Amino acid sequence: MTCTAALALVAISPDVGGQQKAPAARAKSSGPTATAKPPAAASYAQRFAGLCAACHGANGRTGEPLTPVLAGQPSLYAITQLFLFREGRRSNEAMTAVAKTLTDDDLRGFSDFIGTLPPVPAPPPAAPPDAVRMAKGRALAEQHKCVFCHGADLAGGQQVPRIGSQHEDYLRASLHGFQSGSRPGYTQAMTAALSQIPEADLDILAYYVARFPPAGK
Ligand code: HEC
Ligand code: HEC
């Protein structure tokens, strides 16, 4: 991946990781009876079930149109977004309130857990997709190089999110948010990608991406 975003992200990861090493090192030096060990991976599965699943679903997918599907999301993407919410750079009443309570260990633990959730396909659509809008959306995704960063399968990877089969309403809100600046990205990648796209075409992109992969493909 040659996106500039890949380079910029290197700046955050060691920082988050570095901060989380300190308590671990202390726990080690204070002997075998120390209680301040970093929580085990299994406990994040439990904490996700207790704290996150009510909104995001136990398997990372609910039908709630504005609550994003986390299933299949790369852990590196998840950690950058949790970081943005915690630092108040990405804002949403529900999610910011949760993120403010998370430590660096938590950012890492929850994102690692999200990275283990397999993708969950969208339920079968109530109506067959509109062929004209699907064709237009596909052409837009190629013309504007969405596939260059998000992949031909729209599954993302590393710091780039999976977008295929994400909820349409959430996709539409995200695209308009990036374009208007109300959702600042971790990098400028999305603002740049959307800068030349007419607003109405964002809705067609959301329509297409939410129904990707098209049935039978
Ligand atoms: C009260 C409901 C609620 C709870 C509880 C909640 N979330 Fe969220 N979460 C949301 C909503 C709504 C969004 C989308 C916010 C937006 O549109 O900007 C979101 C966004 C996210 C995102 C960004 C996804 C993306 O595609 O960009 C991640 C990652 C995330 N949540 C992880 C978590 C984790 C981990 C927990 C538990 C520690 C959690 N959430 C608890 C409602 C919730
Ligand atoms: C240069 C690489 C690049 C290109 C081109 C690109 N994206 Fe992105 N996209 C990203 C990155 C990186 C993010 C993570 C955003 C951040 O920085 O917080 C993202 C985030 C998103 C999100 C938010 C997903 C979520 O779960 O919140 C959507 C939706 C999206 N892109 C759709 C598109 C569409 C549609 C196109 C084509 C018009 C496109 N992207 C083009 C790199 C790219």
Image: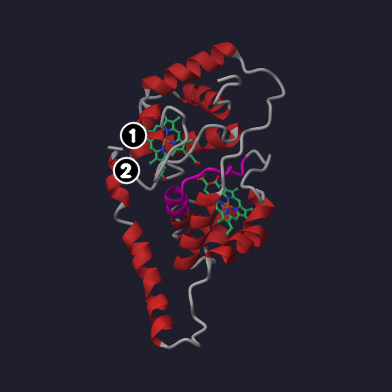
Nearer to the camera, 87 or 20: 20
Q: Which mark is residue 192?
A: 1
Mark 1 CB near ligand 2 (8 Å cut): yes
Q: Which mark is residue 201?
A: none
Q: Is residue 169 left or right of residue 13?
A: right
116 in relation to 141, above or below: below
For the question of whether residue 27 can be seen, the reply is yes
- Look at the numbered disc 1 and give the secondary structure of its residue: helix
The quadrant of the image that shows the N terminus is top left
Nearer to the camera, 182 or 201: 201
Mark 1: amino acid: Ala
Q: Quarter of the image holding residue 84?
A: bottom left
What residue appears at the point 61 percent right and 59 percent down from the top-left corner?
48
Say which of marks 1 and 2 sits in front: 2
Q: Residues within 10 Å of mark 2 (few under 14, many from 20)?
A: some
84 in relation to 105, above or below: above
- The way the protein has been coloured in the rendering is secondary structure
What residue appears at the point 34 percent right and 67 percent down from the top-left corner?
18
Q: Position of residue 146 (x, y in %)?
A: 40, 29
CA–CA distance in space, label 1 to label 2: 11 Å
Mark 2 CB near ligand 2 (8 Å cut): yes
Q: Position of residue 50 (x, y in %)?
A: 67, 61
Q: Position of residue 15 (x, y in %)?
A: 33, 63
Q: Is residue 18 left or right of residue 125?
A: left
Q: Is residue 29 magenta?
A: no
Residue topped by disc 2: 5
**Magenta part of the chain:** 66-81
Q: Position of residue 136 (x, y in %)?
A: 49, 15
